Image (cartoon, rainbow, N blue to C red):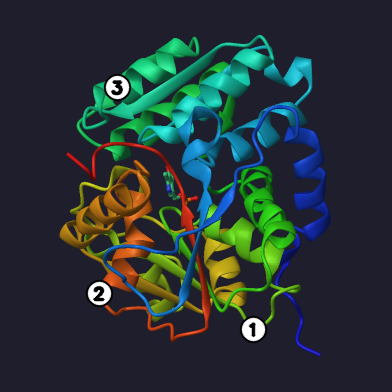
Amino acid sequence: MTKIPDYLQQVTQAMIREAATRVATHIRRTPVMQLNNVRTAITPAHLWLKCEQMQVTGSFKARGAFNKILSLSDAALKRGVIAVSGGNHGIAVAHAARSRGVKATVYVGSSVPPERVAAMQSWGAEVVVAGPTHAEAFAMASGIAEKTGAVYVHPFDDPLVIAGQGTVGLELLEQLEPPDYLLIALGGGGLISGMARAVRETWPRCKIIGIEPAGAAKMRAALDAGKPVKLDKVETKAISIAPNITTPIVHAFVRAFVDDVITVTDAEMIEGCRWLWREAAVAGEMAAGAPIAALMNGKVKATAGQNVCVLVCGAGKDGII
Ligand SMILES: Cc1ncc(COP(=O)(O)O)c(C=O)c1O
């Protein structure tokens, strides 16, 4: 029997079930909707949306942030929490920290939209603009966490965060018959790792596909290289799925449980968001347009009678206007 690498033991199905219990009263069970009777079909298959744009704080990120922060003792939290974010993770951490009565400091790059900064502040977070990009924010935040002893909540490279995101998958198991495809936007890879971990055994034949920006195709590059990679630069406006690195844990999960990782362009994502808005009045941010874009552009070829589930990962207007 092949030995399962240790990374895969870091997030177990039991941890995802525990996460679901832990976060239950803090998050929403989001609906699954069949998107039938559309004006412009993008697939001959039946299309289902898992509506995480309706989640607390506007994205699935609340699940991972709450799971992490609720797992910590008061003593561990006494110096506050620190996060780096392109938006959604920071908003989710700010909310989860406030629920424990502790201060969150969120480090951002200056490209983070002002409305996302305002949302973090509205949950009581202090927001620090660390430099022009995410990379400066990462460097500053990890240095400060080390110096101050504040808890650093990584956006994806943390088993408790991944287990929290996996609760989307647990819900889907109860809401849907096994689909033929599950399409998930891929940033750092915590979301797809948790979800794939949650559903893979129960839905062995479902093709789980990650979709990342062509201008930030770090997981595709890592799979091709056979090891985690760091991209020298990223070129995408889809800020939530723009990280330039993969880490060993997410790389291991994607290799083990995900069928394929494909890319879409920014223009395709915007087209996907506009379609979602026109057909379903769903205001998904650019990342949410990525799976739709994959279908629209024939990059995922589902056939008549098949079932495709698309995760609408977060709310926003960047893809619509
Ligand atoms: C709306 C949205 N979708 C997808 C992702 C990607 O999640 P992950 O980085 O865990 O792959 C993020 C991450 O911030 C996000 O905010």
Residue 105 in view (yes/no): yes
Task: Give me the C-alpha separation between circle 3 and circle 1.
Answer: 40 Å
* Residue receiving disc 3: 115
Q: Which residue is mark 2?
A: 297
Q: Amino acid at mark 3?
A: Glu
Is the distance from the Cβ of mark 1 to the nearest ligand 1 atom less than 8 Å? Answer: no
Density class for disc 3 (Cα within 10 Å; few <14, some 14-19, many ≥20) is few
| Residue 217 x/y as whole percent | 31, 65
- Say if 297 sits above or below 116 in the image: below
Residue beneath disc 1: 205
Quadrant in which the C terminus is drawn: top left
Q: Quadrant of residue 292?
A: bottom left
Q: Is residue 13 left or right of residue 84?
A: right
At x 56%, y 20%, the residue is: 95
For mark 2, give the secondary structure: loop
Asked which secondary structure carries label 3, the reply is: helix
Task: Identify the residue at image location x=54%, y=42%.
Answer: 60
Tell me which amino acid carries mark 1.
Arg
Residue 67: percent from left, percent from top: 69, 36
User: Which is more foreground, mark 2 or mark 3?
Assistant: 2
Q: What distance separates the C-alpha of mark 2 from that of mark 3?
A: 31 Å
Q: Where does residue 120 sit, x and y in percent of width and height?
A: 42, 19
- What's under tag 2, amino acid-wise? Asn
